[in-house]
Image (cartoon, rainbow, N blue to C red):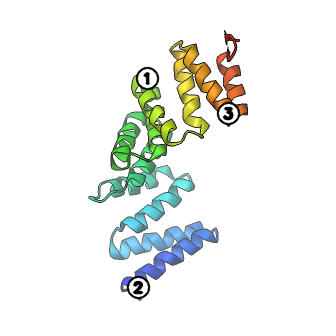
């Protein structure tokens, strides 16, 4: 079956192969679909995701580059590309991908977090604070953005801001708050431990 139904069935075969742990079979099906019928956002997106999970960063990045070059590229494609670029130390390029992702979807908290991390690594602390603050607004009960904000404020010698974050974290992540106090040397009662 070579028509649209046949192509859809082959795509589903690949997805089922992934669920059964047959990743190489899934990749082979997507490779063949792309070879026979040309690239499709659905096929390349699925393949890129699997390649990234398998640690095959270079081919995954090639697929995400193609996906991000399409007129209807999704915020998640830009986020995934940025994530892989950040993992390979390409912080400036990753930052640009995360910026595009949050322009396309301002509610994509993961992209705000990634943008914040990249900006920290690029030494852009003010912009990092802005991005991480947005992340914490979207995910107030996730400790990750809060911890990164606390580290920046500690680096900038702003212990009162670190204390506020620790106090906030104690309400839902007491172990993270305790670890942050040990890491920074800042306690709630006296400022510095």
Q: Dot 1: what SS?
A: helix
On residue 171, the disc is 3
Mark 2–mark 1 Cα distance, whole angstroms, equals: 51 Å
Image x and y of residue 15, in percent: 54, 72
Q: Residue beneath label 2, please?
A: 5
Image x and y of residue 160, in percent: 57, 15
Number of other residues with Cα within 10 Å of mark 1, as a class: few under 14, some 14 to 19, many 20 or more: many
Q: Residue beneath label 1, please?
A: 125
**Taking 182 as reference, is 2 left or right?**
left
Mark 1–mark 3 Cα distance, whole angstroms, equals: 26 Å
The answer to which of 101 and 167 lies nearer the viewer is 167
Mark 2–mark 3 Cα distance, whole angstroms, equals: 52 Å
Image x and y of residue 179, in percent: 70, 27
Number of other residues with Cα within 10 Å of mark 3, as a class: few under 14, some 14 to 19, many 20 or more: few
**Residue sitting farthest toward the left:** 71
Residue at the image position 53 percent from the left and 16 percent from the top: 155
On residue 140, the disc is none
The answer to which of 192 and 20 lies nearer the viewer is 192
Image x and y of residue 151, in percent: 56, 23
Q: Are marks 1 and 3 in contact (CB under 8 Å)?
A: no
Number of other residues with Cα within 10 Å of mark 2, as a class: few under 14, some 14 to 19, many 20 or more: few
Residue at the image position 57 percent from the left and 74 percent from the top: 16
Q: Dot 3: what SS?
A: loop
> Which one is in front in this view, the residue at disc 2 or the one at disc 1?
1
Asked if residue 133 is positioned above or below residue 109 in the image, the reply reads above
Q: Is residue 22 visible?
A: no
> Which one is in front in this view, the residue at disc 2 or the one at disc 3?
3
**Lower sequence index among marks 1 and 3:** 1
């Amino acid at each position: 079956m070579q028509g649209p139904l046949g192509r859809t069935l082959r795509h589903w075969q690949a997805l089922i192969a992934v669920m059964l742990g047959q990743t190489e079979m899934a990749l082979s099906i997507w490779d063949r679909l792309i070879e026979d019928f040309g690239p499709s956002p659905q096929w390349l997106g699925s393949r890129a995701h699997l390649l990234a999970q398998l640690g095959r960063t270079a081919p995954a990045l090639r697929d995400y580059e193609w996906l991000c070059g399409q007129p209807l590229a999704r915020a998640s494609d830009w986020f995934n590309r940025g994530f892989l670029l950040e993992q390979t130390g390409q912080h400036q390029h990753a930052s640009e991908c995360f910026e595009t992702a949050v322009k396309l979807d301002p509610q994509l908290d993961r992209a705000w977090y990634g943008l914040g991390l990249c900006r920290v690594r690029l030494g852009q602390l003010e912009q990092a604070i802005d991005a991480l603050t947005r992340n914490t607004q979207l995910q107030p009960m996730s400790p990750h953005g809060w911890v990164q904000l606390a580290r920046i404020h500690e680096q900038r010698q702003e212990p009162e801001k670190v204390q506020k974050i620790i106090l906030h974290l104690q309400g839902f992540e007491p172990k993270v708050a305790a670890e942050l106090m040990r890491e920074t040397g800042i306690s709630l009662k006296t400022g510095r431990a």
